[in-house]
Structures are given as structure tokens and as C-alpha cells.
Amino acid sequence: MIKQTLYFSNPTYLSVQSKQLVIRLRTPLEESVITRPIEDIGMVVLDHPQITITHNCIRALQANNAVIISCDSKRMPHSILLPLEGHSLQSERFRIQSKATEPLKKKLWQQTIKAKLQNQAAVLKYAGRPFKQLEVLRKRVLSGDSSNIEGQAAAYYWKTLFGDFIRDRYGEEPNHALNYGYAILRSMVARALISSGLHLTLGIHHRNKYNACCLADDIMEPFRPFVDLLVYRMNLQGEISMILSRDNKAKLLAVGQMDGVFARRKSPLLIGISMTASSLYQCYTGRKRKVNYPELKIQAYDISQPTK
């Protein structure tokens, strides 16, 4: 079952009672109460300064491995709250993960970049753009991507997809939509990795000493094109506002419901990410040699192109 994503953008009081999330929505005229089973919730997004959440509520959500995302004054995802313990054999898995050799991590990063380029090519194909160059570059990815094929592919990909566009976290739109989608995706990946008993700090490629989520930033790479596809479709239809609207955010939050193909098995990303995390751990143990990354199949989406 797909876990629910709950988004709150108004004054709200969140508590828990009898394993139910109790949602008290406040307006100047009235207060309404809604409940949701805690076990059905995978992510909670807090996007208003007048939201109150009880400690018992936080504990119940974390016991269920739900992610709590807090947004900043610009209403963009700013921080995530995750459980410290996500697996019964966590300490054992930490030890196995920490012993991963450099050759293994370089092979895993090679797989990661190849999977990312494959999905980027699928996005360009969906958009009716030339995509063969990415397939050529994909074949040139070496162990550890030592020749930085990822960077070469990115330069081609963004220019081909959006034209006169520079991918920059602080750049012009639709960068803000991409930022929002990637932040949600990062939280989903972090949740899955913790549930598999893996440590987010111990990446396979990212090593920034200021980054506490290196592994999530590694593993999310092949998932990014799913966000790109969402943003491309929204941008083509002229739906993206200068300041992301509630409707914009709702569509980006739905990335977890998009279908990917995981080892020939179609699954929503929110479920499939757990398969990816589990396969990564098995690569650390030597039981598997490949990470089960998603494949973006354009047949899963309406390929008719809407016009502005």
C-alpha cells in the first residue's frame, strides 16, 4: 500500500489519539477535525508558521518511519526529521556498510550515473527532444565516473530539455520547482535508507563533511528525472507560478506516486525506493552486484504533448 503524503499550509494543530493522527484545521470562522491512521502516513509536510505538533505525535510518526518535513519562511522544504533507528539490525548493517571498499563504491557510483542518464534520455524522448547523445555518453561512464560524464550529460540535458536554461539552485524558474521536487524526493530516499538500516552520512560518492545525507544524495540521482518530467509537463502547460502555488506543490508532492520499473516490476516510487535501498544493502554484503534502480518508461505516461 502506498503511504499517504499529508501537506499542511494553514494553521493546524496535530496530535495523536488511539493510533490516529488528529488534525485540527483552524480558520477565522471555524475549526474542523479530521483523523488519519498513523500507519498509513509516509510523509508530513509542515508549510505554515502557525502549525503546532505534539511530541507524542512526532514519536508516533517516527515509530512508523514517517518523514516530517519543515518548510522555511520562503515555504520551501528546509529540514527533515527522521528516526535514528529504522531497522532491528541497524548496528550490524552500519558495520557492514562502513566496510564497503573503494572499488565497490566506485562500481556502485558507475551504476548510479548510468541509471540516471538512462532516465534523463527517457525524459528527452518523452519531450520529443534529441536523446541519442545521452545514450552514447552512458556507455562511456567508467568506474567512479572518473571522466565526469555526469557533468557532460547534465550540460546537454538541461539545454536540450528547457532551451535557454541554466540549472542553478538559486536560478530563475523553473529552478524553484525542481528544488521543491528534489527536496521531497531526497526525504523519500532518506526514509527508505534508514528503514533498511543504512547510515545516511556514509555515501558512496558524496563526501562533503557538512552534509549529513551523503548517501541519500547519491541514491536519489536516478530518481531525479521523475521530478524533471513532472516539472517539464507543468512548465509546458504554463502552470508554474513565480511563487509556487499550492496546486504546484501538490503536483510535485505526487512524485512518490509516479510509476517506475524496478527489475521489470512496475511500482510507485514511494514503494520502489525501498527495493532500491534493500538492494544497496545486499550489494554491501556481496549478495547482489547491482542496485535496483528505477527505469522511467515513457509508455507509463501520456505521450501526447499539451500546448501552451
Image (cartoon, grey):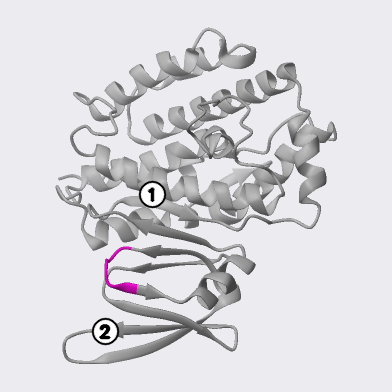
Q: Is residue 261 in view?
A: yes
**Rendering coords of residue 44 (x, y %):** 44, 65
Q: Which residue corresponds to the image point at 79% horizontal and 37% vertical from the top-left?
A: 95
In the picture, measured across the screen, residue 33 lies left or right of residue 270, that is: left
In the shown orientation, is residue 71 left or right of residue 110? Answer: left
Say whether residue 282 is visible. Answer: no
Left or right for 292, reference 139: right
Tell whether position 271 is magenta. no
What residue is rendered at 22% in x and 52% in y? 74
- Which residue is label 1 attached to? 302
State which region is magenta: 47-51
Mark-to-mark CA distance, 2 and 1: 38 Å
Mark 2 = which residue?
26
Q: Find numbered disc 1 in the image and state the secondary structure of the residue it sits on.
A: loop
Disc 1: CA contacts within 10 A as few (<14), some (14-19) or many (>=20): few
Q: Quadrant of the C terminus?
A: top left
